[in-house]
Image: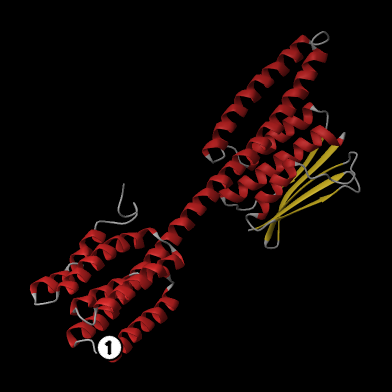
Amino acid sequence: MRLVPKDQDWTAYVYLVYMPYFLVLAFVFPSASWEKAAAVAITLVAVPLYFVGYWLRGRQVLWVIGGFVLLGSLLAPTNPGASVLFVYGASFIGKAFEPRRAWWFLAALLALVGIEARLFHYSMACWIPAIFFSALIGSVIIQQYHRKRLTDQLLRAREEIEHLARVAERERIARDLHDLLGHTLSVIVVKAELASKMFSRDPARAQKEIGEVEAISREALGQVRAAVRGYRLAGIEGELRNARMALEAAGIRLEAAVEPPGLTPAQETVFALALREAVTNVVRHAQATVCRLTLRPSGRYCELEVADDGLGGAPVEGSGLRGMRERVEAIGGAVECNGSKGTSLRVRVPV
Protein backbone atom coordinates (compact mmCIF):
# COMPACT_ATOMS: atom_id res chain seq x y z
CA MET A 1 0.00 0.00 0.00
CA ARG A 2 1.40 3.38 -1.03
CA LEU A 3 0.67 6.74 0.58
CA VAL A 4 1.49 8.66 -2.62
CA PRO A 5 1.33 7.67 -6.33
CA LYS A 6 4.34 6.18 -8.08
CA ASP A 7 5.00 9.36 -10.05
CA GLN A 8 5.47 11.34 -6.81
CA ASP A 9 8.94 11.56 -5.28
CA TRP A 10 10.04 11.53 -1.62
CA THR A 11 9.56 15.29 -1.14
CA ALA A 12 5.87 14.65 -0.36
CA TYR A 13 6.98 13.21 2.97
CA VAL A 14 9.41 16.07 3.65
CA TYR A 15 6.61 18.64 3.39
CA LEU A 16 4.91 16.98 6.36
CA VAL A 17 7.53 18.58 8.62
CA TYR A 18 5.32 21.70 8.89
CA MET A 19 2.22 19.78 9.94
CA PRO A 20 3.05 19.47 13.71
CA TYR A 21 3.51 23.26 13.99
CA PHE A 22 0.02 24.04 15.32
CA LEU A 23 0.03 20.86 17.40
CA VAL A 24 3.27 21.87 19.13
CA LEU A 25 1.98 25.38 19.85
CA ALA A 26 -1.11 23.95 21.53
CA PHE A 27 0.96 21.86 23.95
CA VAL A 28 4.02 24.11 24.47
CA PHE A 29 2.14 27.29 25.28
CA PRO A 30 -0.63 27.58 27.87
CA SER A 31 -3.95 26.58 26.30
CA ALA A 32 -7.24 25.05 27.33
CA SER A 33 -7.82 21.32 27.17
CA TRP A 34 -10.37 21.70 24.39
CA GLU A 35 -7.79 23.64 22.34
CA LYS A 36 -5.34 20.77 22.74
CA ALA A 37 -8.06 18.31 21.78
CA ALA A 38 -9.00 20.43 18.76
CA ALA A 39 -5.37 20.53 17.61
CA VAL A 40 -5.09 16.73 17.89
CA ALA A 41 -8.39 16.16 16.08
CA ILE A 42 -7.47 18.51 13.25
CA THR A 43 -4.09 16.79 12.92
CA LEU A 44 -5.81 13.41 12.58
CA VAL A 45 -7.94 14.85 9.78
CA ALA A 46 -5.26 16.96 8.06
CA VAL A 47 -2.64 14.20 7.61
CA PRO A 48 -4.94 11.79 5.70
CA LEU A 49 -6.37 14.73 3.75
CA TYR A 50 -2.84 15.67 2.71
CA PHE A 51 -2.09 12.23 1.27
CA VAL A 52 -5.50 11.98 -0.41
CA GLY A 53 -4.65 15.18 -2.28
CA TYR A 54 -1.87 13.41 -4.14
CA TRP A 55 -4.25 10.78 -5.50
CA LEU A 56 -7.01 13.10 -6.73
CA ARG A 57 -6.96 14.73 -10.17
CA GLY A 58 -8.43 17.87 -11.68
CA ARG A 59 -11.36 19.51 -9.93
CA GLN A 60 -11.48 16.73 -7.32
CA VAL A 61 -8.48 18.41 -5.68
CA LEU A 62 -10.81 21.30 -4.76
CA TRP A 63 -12.19 19.11 -1.97
CA VAL A 64 -8.71 18.90 -0.46
CA ILE A 65 -8.09 22.63 -0.86
CA GLY A 66 -11.47 23.43 0.71
CA GLY A 67 -10.80 20.96 3.51
CA PHE A 68 -7.51 22.62 4.49
CA VAL A 69 -9.05 26.09 4.32
CA LEU A 70 -11.92 24.94 6.53
CA LEU A 71 -9.58 23.34 9.08
CA GLY A 72 -7.43 26.48 9.13
CA SER A 73 -10.47 28.69 9.60
CA LEU A 74 -11.66 26.59 12.56
CA LEU A 75 -8.31 26.59 14.32
CA ALA A 76 -6.89 30.02 13.47
CA PRO A 77 -8.85 32.09 16.04
CA THR A 78 -7.17 30.23 18.92
CA ASN A 79 -3.96 28.81 17.42
CA PRO A 80 -1.54 30.91 15.28
CA GLY A 81 0.00 27.67 13.97
CA ALA A 82 -3.15 27.15 11.86
CA SER A 83 -1.45 29.34 9.23
CA VAL A 84 0.25 26.19 7.87
CA LEU A 85 -3.15 24.72 7.00
CA PHE A 86 -3.85 27.60 4.63
CA VAL A 87 -0.40 27.05 3.10
CA TYR A 88 -1.15 23.36 2.54
CA GLY A 89 -4.38 24.35 0.80
CA ALA A 90 -2.53 26.80 -1.44
CA SER A 91 0.04 24.14 -2.35
CA PHE A 92 -2.62 22.00 -4.06
CA ILE A 93 -4.03 24.77 -6.28
CA GLY A 94 -1.36 24.25 -8.96
CA LYS A 95 -2.33 20.61 -9.23
CA ALA A 96 -6.01 21.35 -9.70
CA PHE A 97 -5.80 24.00 -12.44
CA GLU A 98 -3.75 25.33 -15.31
CA PRO A 99 -1.72 28.44 -14.35
CA ARG A 100 -4.21 30.97 -15.70
CA ARG A 101 -7.02 29.76 -13.44
CA ALA A 102 -4.71 28.74 -10.61
CA TRP A 103 -3.59 32.35 -10.09
CA TRP A 104 -7.20 33.42 -9.65
CA PHE A 105 -7.86 30.68 -7.08
CA LEU A 106 -4.67 31.56 -5.21
CA ALA A 107 -5.70 35.21 -5.14
CA ALA A 108 -9.15 34.20 -3.84
CA LEU A 109 -7.58 32.11 -1.06
CA LEU A 110 -5.34 35.00 0.00
CA ALA A 111 -8.31 37.37 -0.02
CA LEU A 112 -10.31 34.91 2.08
CA VAL A 113 -7.53 34.71 4.67
CA GLY A 114 -7.36 38.51 4.81
CA ILE A 115 -11.13 38.83 5.26
CA GLU A 116 -11.20 36.18 7.98
CA ALA A 117 -8.26 37.81 9.75
CA ARG A 118 -10.16 41.10 9.84
CA LEU A 119 -13.50 39.59 10.89
CA PHE A 120 -12.23 37.14 13.49
CA HIS A 121 -9.24 39.12 14.68
CA TYR A 122 -6.51 36.61 13.84
CA SER A 123 -3.19 37.38 15.50
CA MET A 124 -0.41 38.79 13.33
CA ALA A 125 1.57 35.60 14.01
CA CYS A 126 -1.20 33.76 12.14
CA TRP A 127 -2.42 35.85 9.23
CA ILE A 128 0.93 37.31 8.10
CA PRO A 129 2.62 33.88 7.67
CA ALA A 130 -0.60 32.50 6.20
CA ILE A 131 -0.74 35.14 3.46
CA PHE A 132 3.01 35.35 2.80
CA PHE A 133 3.80 31.64 2.65
CA SER A 134 0.55 30.75 0.86
CA ALA A 135 1.45 33.26 -1.86
CA LEU A 136 5.06 32.11 -2.03
CA ILE A 137 4.61 28.35 -1.94
CA GLY A 138 1.40 28.43 -3.95
CA SER A 139 3.14 30.38 -6.74
CA VAL A 140 6.15 28.06 -6.80
CA ILE A 141 4.02 24.93 -7.00
CA ILE A 142 1.80 26.42 -9.72
CA GLN A 143 4.95 26.84 -11.82
CA GLN A 144 6.17 23.34 -10.94
CA TYR A 145 2.94 21.71 -12.04
CA HIS A 146 2.92 23.84 -15.19
CA ARG A 147 6.39 22.57 -16.10
CA LYS A 148 5.33 19.03 -15.30
CA ARG A 149 2.32 19.30 -17.62
CA LEU A 150 4.53 20.64 -20.41
CA THR A 151 7.00 17.82 -19.85
CA ASP A 152 4.21 15.24 -19.96
CA GLN A 153 2.92 16.76 -23.20
CA LEU A 154 6.39 16.56 -24.73
CA LEU A 155 6.75 12.94 -23.65
CA ARG A 156 3.36 12.07 -25.15
CA ALA A 157 4.28 13.90 -28.34
CA ARG A 158 7.56 12.01 -28.53
CA GLU A 159 5.77 8.70 -28.03
CA GLU A 160 3.32 9.64 -30.78
CA ILE A 161 6.18 10.59 -33.12
CA GLU A 162 7.92 7.30 -32.40
CA HIS A 163 4.68 5.43 -33.06
CA LEU A 164 4.13 7.27 -36.35
CA ALA A 165 7.76 6.62 -37.32
CA ARG A 166 7.29 2.89 -36.72
CA VAL A 167 4.08 2.91 -38.76
CA ALA A 168 5.79 4.85 -41.58
CA GLU A 169 8.70 2.41 -41.57
CA ARG A 170 6.36 -0.58 -41.77
CA GLU A 171 4.51 1.07 -44.65
CA ARG A 172 7.79 1.86 -46.40
CA ILE A 173 8.96 -1.74 -46.11
CA ALA A 174 5.58 -3.00 -47.33
CA ARG A 175 5.65 -0.67 -50.37
CA ASP A 176 9.24 -1.51 -51.20
CA LEU A 177 8.74 -5.24 -50.88
CA HIS A 178 5.66 -5.02 -53.07
CA ASP A 179 7.59 -3.18 -55.76
CA LEU A 180 10.64 -5.41 -55.50
CA LEU A 181 8.91 -8.77 -55.39
CA GLY A 182 6.12 -7.83 -57.79
CA HIS A 183 8.61 -6.97 -60.53
CA THR A 184 10.98 -9.84 -59.83
CA LEU A 185 8.29 -12.51 -59.62
CA SER A 186 6.78 -11.25 -62.87
CA VAL A 187 10.15 -11.64 -64.62
CA ILE A 188 10.64 -15.08 -63.08
CA VAL A 189 7.19 -16.23 -64.25
CA VAL A 190 7.80 -14.96 -67.80
CA LYS A 191 11.22 -16.58 -68.02
CA ALA A 192 9.98 -19.84 -66.49
CA GLU A 193 7.16 -20.00 -69.06
CA LEU A 194 9.64 -19.27 -71.85
CA ALA A 195 12.01 -21.98 -70.60
CA SER A 196 9.14 -24.46 -70.44
CA LYS A 197 8.19 -23.73 -74.06
CA MET A 198 11.79 -23.90 -75.29
CA PHE A 199 12.75 -27.04 -73.34
CA SER A 200 11.94 -29.48 -76.15
CA ARG A 201 12.87 -27.24 -79.08
CA ASP A 202 15.96 -25.46 -77.79
CA PRO A 203 17.34 -27.01 -74.57
CA ALA A 204 20.32 -24.65 -74.54
CA ARG A 205 18.03 -21.59 -74.61
CA ALA A 206 15.84 -23.14 -71.91
CA GLN A 207 18.88 -23.79 -69.75
CA LYS A 208 20.00 -20.18 -70.25
CA GLU A 209 16.58 -18.88 -69.16
CA ILE A 210 16.61 -21.09 -66.05
CA GLY A 211 20.07 -19.77 -65.23
CA GLU A 212 18.77 -16.22 -65.49
CA VAL A 213 15.85 -17.12 -63.23
CA GLU A 214 18.34 -18.30 -60.62
CA ALA A 215 20.41 -15.12 -60.97
CA ILE A 216 17.31 -12.91 -60.72
CA SER A 217 16.14 -14.78 -57.62
CA ARG A 218 19.49 -14.27 -55.91
CA GLU A 219 19.46 -10.57 -56.82
CA ALA A 220 15.91 -10.24 -55.48
CA LEU A 221 16.99 -11.76 -52.19
CA GLY A 222 19.70 -9.12 -51.84
CA GLN A 223 17.26 -6.36 -52.76
CA VAL A 224 14.75 -7.53 -50.16
CA ARG A 225 17.45 -7.43 -47.50
CA ALA A 226 18.45 -3.94 -48.68
CA ALA A 227 14.83 -2.77 -48.52
CA VAL A 228 14.50 -3.95 -44.94
CA ARG A 229 17.73 -2.15 -44.04
CA GLY A 230 16.34 1.01 -45.64
CA TYR A 231 18.56 1.67 -48.65
CA ARG A 232 18.97 0.68 -52.29
CA LEU A 233 21.93 -1.05 -53.91
CA ALA A 234 20.85 -0.36 -57.52
CA GLY A 235 19.90 3.04 -58.91
CA ILE A 236 18.42 4.18 -62.20
CA GLU A 237 21.00 2.35 -64.31
CA GLY A 238 20.39 -0.92 -62.52
CA GLU A 239 16.64 -0.58 -62.93
CA LEU A 240 17.05 0.21 -66.63
CA ARG A 241 18.96 -3.05 -67.08
CA ASN A 242 16.28 -4.94 -65.17
CA ALA A 243 13.53 -3.26 -67.20
CA ARG A 244 15.19 -4.19 -70.49
CA MET A 245 15.60 -7.80 -69.36
CA ALA A 246 11.97 -8.08 -68.21
CA LEU A 247 10.54 -6.51 -71.35
CA GLU A 248 12.68 -8.61 -73.70
CA ALA A 249 11.62 -11.78 -71.87
CA ALA A 250 7.96 -10.75 -72.39
CA GLY A 251 8.56 -10.00 -76.09
CA ILE A 252 8.14 -6.23 -75.69
CA ARG A 253 10.54 -3.86 -77.47
CA LEU A 254 12.02 -1.12 -75.32
CA GLU A 255 12.65 2.35 -76.72
CA ALA A 256 14.60 4.31 -74.12
CA ALA A 257 15.77 7.93 -74.08
CA VAL A 258 17.52 8.72 -70.83
CA GLU A 259 19.21 11.99 -69.88
CA PRO A 260 19.97 11.38 -66.22
CA PRO A 261 20.13 14.67 -64.30
CA GLY A 262 21.89 15.08 -60.97
CA LEU A 263 19.62 13.42 -58.42
CA THR A 264 19.89 12.98 -54.68
CA PRO A 265 19.86 9.38 -53.39
CA ALA A 266 16.26 9.82 -52.20
CA GLN A 267 15.13 11.12 -55.60
CA GLU A 268 16.98 8.39 -57.47
CA THR A 269 15.37 5.75 -55.26
CA VAL A 270 11.91 7.18 -55.97
CA PHE A 271 12.50 7.17 -59.75
CA ALA A 272 14.03 3.68 -59.67
CA LEU A 273 11.04 2.23 -57.83
CA ALA A 274 8.59 4.11 -60.04
CA LEU A 275 10.32 2.70 -63.12
CA ARG A 276 10.22 -0.79 -61.64
CA GLU A 277 6.49 -0.58 -60.84
CA ALA A 278 5.63 0.87 -64.26
CA VAL A 279 7.56 -1.81 -66.17
CA THR A 280 6.02 -4.54 -63.99
CA ASN A 281 2.54 -3.29 -64.93
CA VAL A 282 3.46 -3.24 -68.62
CA VAL A 283 4.71 -6.84 -68.45
CA ARG A 284 1.72 -8.06 -66.47
CA HIS A 285 -1.25 -6.23 -67.87
CA ALA A 286 -0.59 -4.13 -70.98
CA GLN A 287 -0.33 -6.83 -73.69
CA ALA A 288 1.91 -4.35 -75.50
CA THR A 289 4.54 -4.74 -78.21
CA VAL A 290 6.45 -1.50 -77.57
CA CYS A 291 7.35 0.31 -74.36
CA ARG A 292 8.76 3.84 -74.58
CA LEU A 293 10.76 5.12 -71.64
CA THR A 294 12.06 8.65 -71.19
CA LEU A 295 13.88 10.26 -68.28
CA ARG A 296 14.88 13.90 -68.72
CA PRO A 297 15.07 17.24 -66.93
CA SER A 298 12.13 19.58 -67.52
CA GLY A 299 12.67 23.04 -66.06
CA ARG A 300 12.75 22.78 -62.29
CA TYR A 301 11.62 19.17 -62.49
CA CYS A 302 12.93 15.80 -63.52
CA GLU A 303 10.36 13.78 -65.45
CA LEU A 304 10.04 10.05 -65.98
CA GLU A 305 7.53 8.74 -68.52
CA VAL A 306 6.75 5.11 -69.27
CA ALA A 307 4.27 4.57 -72.13
CA ASP A 308 3.13 1.46 -74.02
CA ASP A 309 0.93 0.66 -77.00
CA GLY A 310 -1.14 -1.90 -75.15
CA LEU A 311 -4.78 -2.16 -74.08
CA GLY A 312 -4.94 1.08 -72.12
CA GLY A 313 -8.19 1.90 -70.38
CA ALA A 314 -9.04 3.68 -67.15
CA PRO A 315 -6.15 3.16 -64.73
CA VAL A 316 -6.97 1.27 -61.54
CA GLU A 317 -4.90 2.42 -58.58
CA GLY A 318 -3.81 -0.72 -56.79
CA SER A 319 -1.35 -0.99 -53.95
CA GLY A 320 1.64 -0.62 -56.28
CA LEU A 321 0.51 2.61 -57.91
CA ARG A 322 -0.75 3.96 -54.60
CA GLY A 323 2.59 3.24 -52.97
CA MET A 324 4.35 4.97 -55.85
CA ARG A 325 2.15 8.03 -55.51
CA GLU A 326 2.75 8.26 -51.75
CA ARG A 327 6.50 7.93 -52.24
CA VAL A 328 6.60 10.59 -54.96
CA GLU A 329 4.34 13.05 -53.14
CA ALA A 330 6.46 12.67 -50.00
CA ILE A 331 9.31 14.51 -51.80
CA GLY A 332 7.03 17.11 -53.44
CA GLY A 333 6.41 15.36 -56.76
CA ALA A 334 3.34 14.24 -58.67
CA VAL A 335 2.15 11.18 -60.59
CA GLU A 336 -0.08 11.28 -63.69
CA CYS A 337 -1.60 8.26 -65.40
CA ASN A 338 -3.40 8.25 -68.76
CA GLY A 339 -5.00 5.22 -70.41
CA SER A 340 -6.53 6.79 -73.54
CA LYS A 341 -3.92 5.44 -76.01
CA GLY A 342 -2.19 2.55 -74.39
CA THR A 343 -1.04 3.47 -70.92
CA SER A 344 1.19 6.41 -70.06
CA LEU A 345 2.63 6.95 -66.59
CA ARG A 346 4.42 10.22 -65.82
CA VAL A 347 6.35 11.02 -62.63
CA ARG A 348 7.56 14.56 -61.95
CA VAL A 349 9.85 15.42 -59.08
CA PRO A 350 11.36 18.85 -58.27
CA VAL A 351 15.16 18.89 -58.43
Farthest top residue in view: 200
The three-letter code of the residue at mark 1 reads: Phe
Query: Would residue 11 be found to the left or right of residue 286 on screen?
Result: left
Above-or-below relation of 117 to 347: below
Q: Residue shown at 19%/87% (left/top)? A: 123
**In this view of the protein, which residue sits in the foreground, 126 or 137?**
126
Above-or-below relation of 72 to 269: below
Q: Residue shown at 67%/17% (left/top)? A: 211
Q: Position of residue 243 (x, y in %)?
A: 72, 35
Query: Would residue 242 be found to the left or right of residue 28 on screen?
Result: right
**Which quadrant of the figure has residue 62?**
bottom left
Q: Position of residue 19 (x, y in %)?
A: 21, 67
Say few, some or many: other residues with alpha carbon within 10 Å of mark 1 (under 14 / 14 to 19 / 20 or more): few
Q: Position of residue 343 (x, y in %)?
A: 85, 44
- Kind of element beneath mark 1: helix
**In this view of the protein, which residue sits in the foreground, 283 or 89?**
89
How many discs mark residues in the rendered view?
1
From the image, which quarter does the C terminus lie in? bottom right
Q: Residue shown at 64%/47% (left/top)? A: 270
Query: Would residue 144 be found to the left or right of residue 266 on screen?
Result: left
**Which quadrant of the figure has residue 29?**
bottom left
Q: Position of residue 8 (x, y in %)?
A: 32, 57
Residue that carries the numbered disc 1 in the rendered image = 120
Q: Residue shown at 59%/32% (left/top)? A: 224
Above-or-below relation of 26 to 285: below
Colour mode of the rendering: secondary structure
